[in-house]
Amino acid sequence: MSLIRAFWLAFSALAVSTLSVQSTAEDVELYLLDPIDAILNNYCIDVNGPPQGMQLRGPLQVHTCYSYQGDLTADQLMHSDDIARGKIRIVSVDLCAQLDGAEPGDTITLTGCADIEEQSFKLKENGHFGPTLHPELCLTAGPTSWLGGPAGGPYNENQARTLTLQRCDAEALRYQGWGTRTEMLQL
C-alpha cells in the first residue's frame, strides 16, 4: 500500500469518526425535573440577564425554561455531548461553569473552558448533578422564587431562583433532580 493511500485511508477514517461524534450532539436545556411552583415551564440552568444581554460575570441561576416559547435560547442552550463529558457549557458564548468554592452555599460561574476538575460535573442516574471533585455536593435550586423581567420592569411571569451547591440529599431531590431535554414536554 502506498504511503499516500495509507494516509488518505487514515484521514478518511478520522473524518468519518469526527462527523459521527458531532452528529450525535443535540441542543438541550438542563432542567429541574420537579416544576416546583413554575408558572410557565420548569426551571433551567440559566445565565442571568436576557439572552441578548447575558451577565457573564455573575453566578449562574435557575430560570423559567424558555422552551415554552418553542425554542431553546442562547442563555440556556447546551450540548448533550458536553454534559455527557461532564461540562456545563453555554454554547452561544463558549464558556463553561466552574466552581466558585466547595462549601454548601457556594455558586458556579462561567469562565473559559478548560480541562480542570473545577469544571467537571456528573449527572447521576437519580438526577443529582454535581461536581466530580466533591461528589457529596449537588447543584441545588434555591427555596424561593421571584418574578423575572428586566431591571426597572416591566415584570413578566418568568421566574428565577438562586443556584448553589448543597449537600446531596434524597429529601431535597425536588430542588436537586436534573435532566436534559431538547424541547418542552407536553403535560
Image: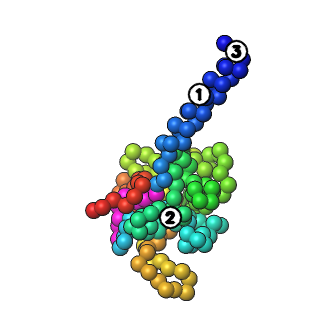
Q: Is residue 28 left or right of residue 93?
A: left
Mark 1 and mark 2 in contact? Answer it, CB < 8 Å: no
Q: Secondary structure at mark 3?
A: loop
Q: Earlier in the sequence, mark 2 or mark 3?
A: 3
Q: Is residue 154 magenta?
A: no
Q: Nearer the viewer, residue 7 or 140?
A: 7
Q: Position of residue 66 (x, y in %)?
A: 44, 67
Q: Residue 2 shows which numbered tag?
A: 3
Q: Where, quadrant-wise, is the C terminus in this rendering?
A: bottom left
Q: Which residue is mark 1?
A: 13
Quadrant in which residue 173 is drawn: bottom left
Q: Is residue 67 left or right of residue 96?
A: left
Residue at horizontal 56 percent and vertical 83 percent from the top: 151
Vertically, is 63 above or below 131? below
Q: Secondary structure at mark 2?
A: loop
Q: Position of residue 26 (x, y in %)?
A: 47, 49
Disc 2 crowd, CA 10 A, few/some/many (<14, 14-19, 20+)? some
Disc 3 crowd, CA 10 A, few/some/many (<14, 14-19, 20+)? few
The answer for how far apart the CA atoms under marks 1 and 2 are is 35 Å
Q: Residue 73 shows which numbered tag?
A: 2
